[in-house]
Amino acid sequence: MSLFKRPALADCVPELVATARGDRPASLVILGGRLVNVVSGEIIPGMSVAVQGSRIAYVGKDVSHTIGPDTVIIEAEGRYIAPGLLDGHCHIESTQLTVTEFAKAVLPLGTTGGFFDAHEISNVLGLKGLRLMLDEARTTPMAAYMQVASCVPSTNAELETTGASFGPEEVAEALSWGPDMIGLGEVMNFPGVVYGEETMIGEIQATLRAGKVADGHFTWASDDWRLPVYAASGITGDHECVTPEDVAERIRLGMYAKMRQGSAWHDVAETIKACTEMGLDTRRMMLVTDDRSSESLLKEGHMNFVVRHAIAQGVKPVTAFQMATINTAERFGVARDIGSIIPGSIADIILLEGRLADVQVSATIAAGRIVAKNGKMVADWDSFTYPGEVLNTMRIDRTIRVTDFALPAPVRAGETEARVIKVTENHVETKEVKMMIPVEEGKAVTDPGKDLCKIAVFERHKGTGNSAVALVTGIGFTEPAAIAMTVAHDSHNLLVIGNDDEMMARAANQVISMKGGSAVISASREALMPLPIAGLMSPAPFAEVAKQSEGISTALQHAGCTLNNAFMTLSLLALVVIPEIRLSDKGLVAIGADGIHMVSLFTADETERV
């Protein structure tokens, strides 16, 4: 049972009205601040707020009539009083933190709620994993709304192997768990929607019948004729915006455009021009993270960082706050409860020092209780325990060998042309490039001088023994090195990347022995990050996980990989729904205008595997 209750407004009306008229003392009041009114878009000085329990009872110049002998009083002393920040698209698992530790990390930064798509743990553990995340979220002070994963798997079983499978029945069941199951998570299989794939359409229908919202993930060009087709399905939000035109086209179709500033993808500077240069109405523009690593949370921040960054691009401060509060709440249909400081709303409130543009949070109130001051948590709650089976999800019962990374070539010696995955820094998409690959004794070999690595995926959920090896460029290793990890969106099989087969085998076996996580092994150093919870998350405290994350980043940098937040970028190389080319446990997958299909590694073999 959570200590931070969020009862329905209907159940609170008598107490709220009594407090507002002065017949019942407020539980907490904030006196004399500058109210950031995201509803009217203005800053109002000399305002105070009275809270009864978890909800706001009164907002005005004078709340003295609500103060009693036991009322907790906070003197704002001219500080800004703003609604708590909301993340409109986030995967908590991508921080490698549990929900509890995530809450402890972001609440002091001013994030009081979010809309979390738990499709990482869902791909490993199915509905059981989603339910565990929901149950843990309910113990925290956050306004934590969960979405049921739409793409388990992200495409279909012919292209990849995951630990579970969702269809319309699973979606309907999960959405029945309560009002905090807010909708359908990002529908990454956009070709399936456009071309009427039965399961994908059925999941959207189950969502709409439950009165919930469906989120999108559309990566074809914004002027593609199929974007209106996608919108016709009832999907009303999308975070795959990288240009101002992407934002504009979605808004014109009635969708909410989510502009993201994650650890590895930096899209706000461009997408925000839909506001600053195109002058479009901002009410359907949202700021989101999608996602920020524990290391980034510690060093830069969460939604406070994103809002500050948007303001630095020329957005009015109040407008930027709207994009991270009321716009987000309205998109998900919960603006009566969160996203603004108005009578009746839940008291998720932050106080800010200095200039509003600095987004310097000095105190956080969640569900009417002070939970953080001056960057530190001051509230605590009971820990959540994950069952034993969640800590043992590795189904690889053998030792990975050097020979597992061999690439038999179509020629005995010399060179042969191959399709190579090219990493794009700070972007989720990859490029397919053709390269001439050296061949020795019938096997393709990596060439560090050409920044060429091998990439391998080993199935870890069902013991199938599936594995595939391909080639990748753009990693930047300048010495023998390898990284292995079970954070490999969205199938989360064992992903290994390196330019030395022996080190690749060592890194893979290290991760298997840890029952999930990440290992970097190079000529200069080693780094480990155990992630035993579904192979995705650590039970350790936030600061410890952030330190381990930094260790992985530092080890990669010393080996020559200078990609910004390389771990998060590399973790997407097995996500077979993002253009142009990825690797699954079943082989190379190409994603283009004509759909998604398997392709051969070597162009000498032009026969596609379907």
Image (spheres, rainbow, N blue to C red):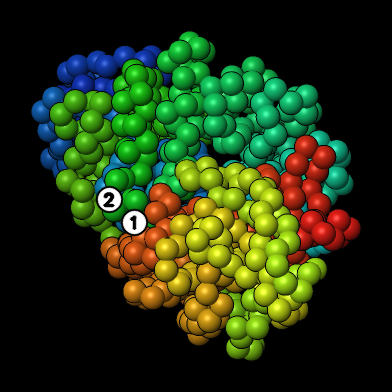
Amino acid type at circle 2 is Lys
User: According to the image, label 1 marks what residue?
Assistant: 295
Which mark, by number, is residue 515?
none
Q: Above or below — where is 362 with respect to 83?
A: below
User: According to the image, label 2 marks what residue?
Assistant: 299
Q: Above or below — where is 235 with respect to 599?
A: above
Task: Give the residue drawn at x 30%, y 65%.
Answer: 547
Secondary structure, mark 2, is helix
Residue 464 visible to an observer of this rendering: yes
Amino acid type at circle 1 is Glu
Lateral position of residue 164 relative to residue 473, left or right: right
Lateral position of residue 363 relative to residue 553, left or right: left
Q: Above or below — where is 328 with respect to 103?
A: above
Quarter residue 215 falls in = top right
Q: Which one is in front, 328 or 3?
A: 328
Lateral position of residue 42 relative to residue 360, left or right: right
Numbered label tally: 2
For mark 1, does the 10 Å Cα neighbourhood hold few (<14), some (14 to 19), or many (20 or more) residues? many
Secondary structure, mark 1, is helix
Quadrant where the N terminus sits is bottom left
Lateral position of residue 610 relative to residue 64, left or right: right
Q: Position of residue 313 (x, y in %)?
A: 35, 23
Q: Position of residue 550 (x, y in %)?
A: 33, 62
Task: Give the residue drawn at x 68%, y 70%.
Answer: 439
Quarter residue 332 falls in = top right
Task: Give the residue drawn at x 66%, y 37%.
Answer: 219
Q: Which one is in front, 15 or 304?
A: 304
Q: Above or below — where is 44 with respect to 388?
A: above
